[in-house]
Structures are given as C-alpha cells and as structure tokens.
Amino acid sequence: MSSEKNLQADKTITKNISSPFRWRKYFFLIPLFSLLLLHSCKEPDAIGLDVLPDADGLHLQFSDSATILSKTVREDSLRTDEISTHLLGSIWDPVFGKHEASVYAQLALEGIPNFGIYTQADSLVLSLLYTGYYGDTSYSQAISVYRITENMYYDSAYYSNKTFSYDPNPLGTAGIAPKPFTPVVVGSDTVSARVRIKLNVTLADSIMALNGQSQLSSNAAWIDYFKGIYIKSDPVSSGTQGNMSYLNFVGSKMIIYFHDTANAVKSYSFSLASTRISHFDHDYAGTDVQQQLNDSNAIDTLSYVQAMAGVKTKISFPFLKHFLDSGSIVLNKAELELTPDASSITNYAPPSQLFLLAIREDGTSYFPADYFELSGYYGGSYNATTNKYKFNMGRQLQRLLDGRDENFGFYIVPSGSSIQANRVILGRQEKIGDQTYKLKLNLYYTKLPR
C-alpha cells in the first residue's frame, strides 16, 4: 500500500481533530479502567497498555494500516576499546559488500621477565582465544601481524574508525581457517580453541636480549618501547563469503618459548588484556545498500541493518496523530512487527537481537519507555520459527500521542553491534514478489469519550 493510501486509511479511522491532552478531562474513567487492567498496568500514564479488554465494553479499536516510512542510513562509529569480544577477518556479502575487522592491541608484561643467561628463543607465538565466528569457516584467510609505531592510551576512548600507524613489514603471517570449537594441542597439553600465529623469532631474541634493562623494568617502560601490534586479514575476493573470528583478548597472549641448559622448555607470556581497539572497514560499492545510501529520498523500500558500525534502518510514523482526529485514545497495545527477507539469511545469519531506539531532534537516540519495563516486555529477539522480530512500543507511542515526546522517528540497530558481524534485510509495507515481508504496526486502542 502506498503512503497516500495509508494516509487515507489512517484518516478514515476518526475525524474532528482533538487535543492529545483532552483525555485528561476523563480522568474519572481511570478507576473503571484500572479494575479491568490492574493485573498488568501500574502507572497512570500506561492505562490499558498490552491488555486487550472486551471490545464492546471499552470500544476497542484495531489498526494495522498505519503508514511506516523506512530508510537505510549509515551508522555512526562505535566505541570499541577494551570490549568483551574483538572481531578479526574479512567477509563478502552480495547485498552489503565487503567488510573487514582488525585489531590494535598493546602487549602488557605479566610480571618482570627474567631470561637469565638465555638470549635465544625457540619460537614466538601469538595465541588468540576464540569465542565464536560468523561466515564460512572453511575459507582460509591470510592473517598478518604488524608492529604499531604510535602510542595508545588505556584511559582514552577509541572508536571503530580509529587507526594507528604501524610498520608495514609483518612480524608474521598465517593462513587461518577458523576452528572455534576445536581444541588445540600445544606441546603435551590440549587447550581450548584458539588462533595460533607464529611470529618472527628474531623479535623474541631482541626482547630476551633486553633482560635486566630498563625496557623490561615496568609495564610503562615496556609499552613505551614496544607500543603494540596490529592484526588484520587480507580482504576476501568478491564472490567469496569469507568469515569473522570472534576473539577474547582478555585470555589471549604473545608467548616466547625457549629452553634452558637442561633442555627444559621455558616460556614467558605477554598479556593482550590491556589497551585494545577494534577497527571496522566497509565497502558498499555496487551494492543494493549503496543505492539506498546514495538516494536521500529513498523510502518505503527494503531496509538494511548491519553490525560493526555499518548501516541501520530509520523508520517513522508520519501520520500517527491522525488517530486523534475524532478524539483522544489510550493505547492498549502497540506492536511493531519486522520480517526479514527469508531468502537472505541462509548463509548470513540475522542478529539474534535488535534494538529499537527513539530519535531526538539532534539525531542522537535513546531507549524508548517500553525498554525499561519488565524483562521480556520490550522484545526485539529474532524468532526463527516465525521469521520475525517484534517490539512492544505502546508506552513510547502514547508519549508521542500525548505530546510528551517529539516524534522524530526510530532507529533499528543490532544489539552488540561492536562485537558481532551479523546483518539482516528487513521487508517493507508492500508485497515483494510472491512473498510478503511486512513491516507492520499493530495498534489496539480505546477511544475516550469526548
């Protein structure tokens, strides 16, 4: 249905514009409503929300024809320093394009090292713990490690578009096909799944040669000498899905292995739990997403939501207040229903949870009133059985109708956008081919006497 048709449908619901505050004249009705709705509503401004009383008794109305306009927009950069999971890899998506995730990280001393008389290492290994993955794990990516030449600071805020200078000569490179659930044998031990990248042993030798010197006397002195590492993958080729490894840097290390005169194996570890930043790059060239981003007037089309500070969907209800045309109303339930394009999620799993954020006049966003209700009320979880996301937004829409909040629209974004790589294509209000990927607002409301 076009926007014009939806507008007419909205206008036929009621007539004669009334103030959104007119319902307060009928405050004497609240005790009656409260008797019916007591088991679920406790706030005076939330009368009837999420309760569907007898339609004849309270003149319950229903509408699912409210006009919803949608537009794909770029996400702002995200803060990514010292987050719980860091992404590493490169992925190609036929709709979203090419995307890369890399990591800058300091190496912290785990106690003052004492290499004694030993100045030669057996090996130097970067060991990164898995927490999960996204994409095709059968694809092997070239992962390279570089030495950072610029200072990073633990007490600074860093965002996903931040870069640091580094020496272009790699310390080590390895072809990695992620195995996030396969234990690894290290020497005589079997340890949890991890990426292990061998680095240039001459770096280990140079570190051991500093034994007893000021560079190894404190963590501050060490970081001033060795500022950290940059870990990145080569970009995948178009047509190759690629993958993202999800990594826990708190338990990750760079390890020097050496042996003593009795040939006993020794090791010293540097922790990666210190300053660390995820960096994301996106290339939408030639994609459907790029067409949306380039057309500032594009509305009511397929919409796109992507993690990693990629893109988000902005939706708006431009004619919402026409529900007040014949008098004030109280929303009993308002449910936003989002349906992904089912054909697009086979190889690219959708986010398990989306957030619906209200927008301020300056473009910043905030959680709507419904978010702060009891656990599970707000919604936003993906239901694989129904292929839907659903949000309860009755409290926030009531605030818009009452004029307590301004109506600048809403953003749809992934939960955990800085620590996952998922994306989803959301349907519009119109039928698409033989499928209906409906973007729909289900409203149940009660008309108040005039």
Image: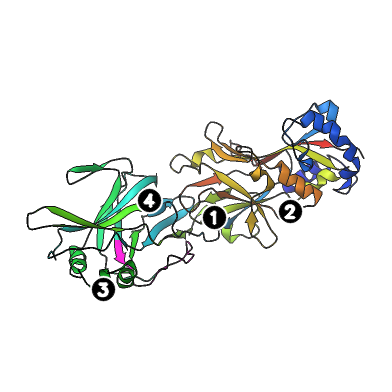
Q: Which residue is drawn at the image coordinates 70% and 61% (left, top)?
A: 361
> For mark 4, what is the residue?
248
The residues bearing labels 3 and 4 have C-alpha atoms spaced at a distance of 30 Å
Q: Looking at the image, is mark 2 or mark 1 earlier in the sequence?
A: 1
> For mark 1, what is the residue?
311
Q: Say which amino acid is labelled 4.
A: Asn
Percent across and percent down for residue 211 are 19, 68
The residues bearing labels 2 and 1 have C-alpha atoms spaced at a distance of 22 Å
> For mark 2, what is the residue?
407
Camera-near label (3 vs 4) is 3
Please tell me whether residue 158 belongs to the stretch shown in magenta. yes
Splitting the image into 4 quarters, where does residue 293 fall? bottom right
Q: Which residue is drawn at the image coordinates 26% and 73% (left, top)?
A: 214
Are the two marked residues, 1 and 3, in contact with CB atoms closer than 8 angstroms?
Answer: no
Are the two marked residues, 1 and 4, in contact with CB atoms closer than 8 angstroms?
Answer: no
The residues bearing labels 3 and 2 have C-alpha atoms spaced at a distance of 60 Å
